[in-house]
Image: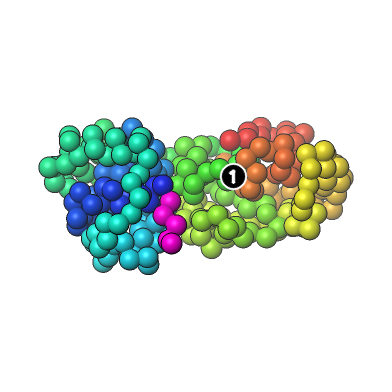
Amino acid sequence: MVMIRKNERALLYLIRYFKKINKIELVKRTFLISQASRIYDYIPYKSSPFSFQLYHDLNHLEKNGFIETDDDYVKLISDKFPEPEVGPRRAINYHISVFGEEDGETIRRYVYDNYPFYTIFSKTEKKESYVRDENGILTIGYEGRSVDDFILNLIKNKVSILVDVRKNPFSMKYGFSKKQISGYSEEIGIEYIHIPGLGIESSKRKNLKPEDYAALFSEYESDLINRENELGILRKLGKDKKIALMCFEKDSNFCHRGVIGKKLHSDGFCVENV
């Protein structure tokens, strides 16, 4: 049996109402629905709100025979799928009752007028300005976040450079392997840099208990003297632009990026964990 995730069930439920729908219109409708019941996260993009995860899910649903897609449209092929959860189902039904008969242009206009932040990178109509004019250093983990929510945090914090401090920039979680996260970041004007020399060997991180982290990070902190070249790169970048040090763990206290952050803070930088 094909595993259909809860957000994919909600997506199919919405597509079933229209039977065939323009992709851009679908994204904007799910964006509006997600304001009431979170189905996907969204970033400002070329055509206002966009979700990389949603497009990834469309590919998954097409491969498994639920939908057909072309460059512009999505068409329902099979309506044999589990119903979405109560919250998303109610939000979708409400959206249909209010906006179901509206055309794509009306939906686009409504989104542009009511959510101007999401037009900052629009190729057609900007309703709000946006400039990356800050410097400094952030640290951020992607544990428990979608790639869209992760990138949204970078945008809101005016990050210019994403610095990947993983030893091996691979992830089983969609969107966070090097090729994906670098490509998605650069799509919205954020430079990606990988500095493997600041990473910790994966063999040292296996099967750690909470009490083991202190010893691991103490050893890592002592070894930072041998990573001065890499730290020098961060200092230089952080003086001129806002940079974000990226790794997996949500809590920087359980991640080596927290140790790096403390070192840079002792060097006089303001370091914030987001």
Asked if residue 38 can be seen in this view, the reply is: yes
Q: Which residues are magenta?
A: 1-5
Q: Which residue is pictured at 51% across the width and 56% down the height? A: 174
Q: Is residue 176 above or below residue 49?
A: below
Disc 1 is placed on an element classified as loop
Give the residue drawn at x 18%, y 51%. 18
Residue 30 x, y percent position in the rendering: 30, 44
Main SS, magenta residues: loop
Q: Nearer the viewer, residue 103 or 234?
A: 103
Membership of 184 in magenta stretch: no
**Number of residue marks:** 1
Residue drawn 35% across the image and 35% down it: 87
Q: Disc 1 marks which amino acid? A: Glu
Picture coordinates of residue 60, whole percent (x, y):
40, 61
In this figure, which residue is indicated by the disc labeled 1?
143
Residue 132 seen: no
Which quadrant would the C terminus be assigned to in this image?
top right
